[in-house]
Image (cartoon, rainbow, N blue to C red):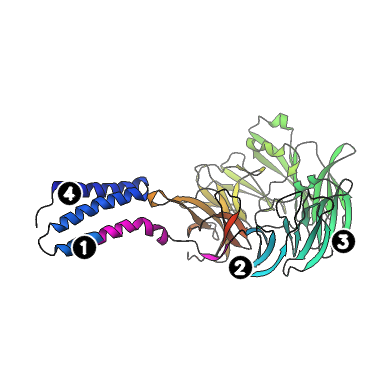
Amino acid sequence: MRGIGAGTLTLGLLGVALCALTLWRGWSPVAWWFGVAMLAVAMITTAWRREERRAWWAGGAVAVALLMAAVPVVEPLVRPQAEVAWSLQGTEEPVGATESLILTVDGDRLLRARAADDGSVAWDHPVPMSEAHDDAPVDVVGDVVLIGAHSIADMDEEMLAVDAGTGAELWTGPARIAPFVHDGTVLAAWAYDDGDVHRGIDLNTGEVLWSNPGSRGAYRSVPARTPGGGVPAMGWLVEVQSIDGDRSHVVTDVRTGDQMTVPGSELPTAFGIVGDQLIVHALEDSLEELRDAEILPSEVTAYDLTTGDRTWSAPLQLGRHAWGLFADSTQLTTVDGTTLLSSADGLRLDVLHLTDGGQVSVPSPSGQPFLQFPQSTRMIYETWVHGNTAVGLMGSLELAVVDLEAGTAALVPDPPFGSVAGTTWINGRPAPVWEEPTLAPFGREYDQLTAVDVHDPQSPERVDLGALPDGTVAGTFAERVVVVASTDEGSAATAMHVLAPSEHAR
């Protein structure tokens, strides 16, 4: 066999270098194919110089070149994918859910209730058109679905209540309401009747059971809704009113409409309902006096709403960045509706349990401070919470899993980055899930679904669930992560994918 010529060797080395640079720098497949072509020419030239079985060697060189050329095509196909339970093509998007059904509305304003397990249609119903709004308002209220209720609906428009399980029509009523909360039997809502009022509406019949003067300000006592979540379940509704010149908390029993008044404060406060208690969180001085303070002293007080009695109070120190929460009487910033978190120095997380006023202090697991960051109109410490388990962000962009009951915290190894996109279920247990932008070979990007198994808060584990199908996470509906793909302009859905629950061996 003749020796390899200098030109051939140089060409082959340049091809190898170009392929290596393409992978290292994330260049497009075109650069890779140029490198493969250079290497292929060098290999075929070298093979053809052999005096024996040159055709075999040349064929082998061609085969290797073709295999290398196929790598950019095959790579996306062999990438581990998140398991999809079922998918839809078209314009359907999720708008709500029950325990077993995912509610969707399509571009023709048809509401469908699909089984979360397999996507089969349990029932469907058209959503009425409205001149006041373009969206399709759908509210899940316990076992009832309200279709068309909207605070800016025209006075002559009507909404429809249907059975969430069967789609059977139950009753109709004025559409111009804003649902607040329900207790399983009665819906408390804002309505307009020659002025702002609060109404109690029987969920089975639509009968107005009670009506009180009230404003939309009562939304401040209502827990924020999440994608896939319905109207919150709660037995009481609260708003701040001025009575004889004094600020007071007016509390309404959702079932009966009966009201009681709990004295308020001229100092900045936040308030909310926890079980049968009104929780009032008040600063101990005015914002003007505390604006430059490093630590804000505050007090949390609980009132038993069955008796009106004060049941407990506890001091709570806040960091200076928290003062903006009290610019006006506003919704209490609770964790999962039952707990308050604060951190005056960042190096410990103070946990106040609002059911009984019990407190625990959680030391930082890494020496880095717990971070507080904005979410909607609130400042929070937790990126995800379920029951007594919360996930928080640390100062060095670490993630900590906090056991709110035991008062302990542990770092997540190799933590995912970005924002929590929803909740998935791993081995039947809830777990936070992230939609992580990930760089693949050849300059391609895709979204990786990553969860953290937190069922043992002392040893959390990262779980890679695979690449998402085209689209972004819309939220968690009926314990399923739902991904919606849309047009480039984001104007309409083109597909909806419902992911399967995960199995993970620890």
Q: Are marks 2 and 1 in contact (CB under 8 Å)?
A: no
Dot 4 or dot 2: first in sequence order is 4
**Residue at the disc numbered 1:** 59
Q: Which residue is mark 3?
A: 207
Q: How much space separates mark 3 and mark 1, taking CA atoms? A: 83 Å
Q: Which secondary structure lies at badge 4?
A: helix
Give amino acid for label 1: Gly
Q: Amino acid at mark 3?
A: Glu
* C-alpha span from label 2 to label 1: 50 Å
Q: Residue at x 78, y 48 (%)?
A: 152
Query: Is residue 279 in view?
Result: no
Tell me if I can see residue 383 in this picture.
Answer: yes
State which mark lies toward you, 3 or 4. Answer: 4
Q: Nearer the viewer, mark 2 or mark 1?
A: 1
Task: Give how far across and how far down residue 247 sits, in percent.
Answer: 84, 39
Q: Earlier in the sequence, mark 2 or mark 1?
A: 1
Task: Give the CA distance from mark 3 to mark 4.
Answer: 88 Å
Cα gap from disc 2 to disc 3, whole angstroms: 34 Å
Reading the chain from its start, which is encountered first: label 3 or label 4?
4
Residue wearing tag 2: 119
In what quadrant of the picture does the N terminus appear? bottom left
